[in-house]
Amino acid sequence: MSDILEGRIVASARGWIGTPYLHQASCKGAGTDCLGLLRGVWREVLGAEPETPPAYSMDWLEPARIEALWGAARRHLMPKALEEEAAGDVLLFRMRDGAVAKHLGIAGHTGANASFIHAYSSHAVIESPLSLPWRRRIVARFTFPKERF
């Protein structure tokens, strides 16, 4: 992905900062969850969403051990090696060992001041440091599809 496109993705994600957390929502300024943030950035940068997600619970099918969020990411995003960090990457997190991956964010900065933009329960959309505890939870890294740009 080019620096210009990475910049567009990061700028779009940062435009959502302050949007309150609201499960299953994707409306800048009104409410969003982590998937809604990604969906909103997709719409702003790429256009129409490739699919409308079905209703989903906050546990992301964890009791059934179904990797629903990871499956959707594989359908629409391009996988990358975990060590190939770039701004604008989509980061998928497993919040605890043995759980399904059910949180995502967009890399804001890489390197010594690494950060990511995300929404999660009880918070608004924020840009957080990509600290070691967060880094340990990353299970997959993706880019937006290049052919869409």
Image (tube, rainbow, N blue to C red):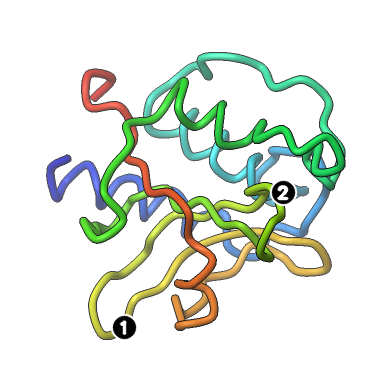
Instruction: Find residue 25 and report its horizontal and vertical position in percent.
Output: 77, 39
Secondary element at tag 2: loop
| Residue situated in front as seen by the camera: 62 or 20 | 62
Q: Name the residue under label 1.
A: 113
Q: Write down the quadrant of residue 113 in the picture.
A: bottom left
Numbered circle sitting on residue 55: none
Quick check: marks 1 and 2 in contact, CB under 8 Å?
no
Foreground residue, 22 or 136? 136
- In the image: residue 112, left or right of residue 100: left
Q: Residue furthest left?
A: 2
Q: What residue type is labelled 1?
A: Asn
- Residue at coordinates 66% horizontally, 64% vertically from top-left? 97
| Residue at image coords 66%, 59% | 119
- Residue 9 is situated, as x and y percent measured from the top left of the image, at 35, 46
Residue at image location 57% in from the left, 34% down from the top: 39
> Vertically, is 104 above or below 68?
below
Q: What element carries label 1?
A: helix
Q: Which amino acid does label 2 sit on?
A: Asp
* Residue pointed to by mark 2: 33
Residues at marks 1 and 2, CA–CA distance in whole angstroms: 24 Å
Q: What residue is drawn where x is 45% and y is 72%? A: 135
List x then y, in percent, for residue 124.
71, 65
- Residue 28 lies, with reference to residue 64, above or below; the image says below
List x then y, in percent, for residue 118: 58, 60
Q: Quadrant of the N terminus?
A: top left
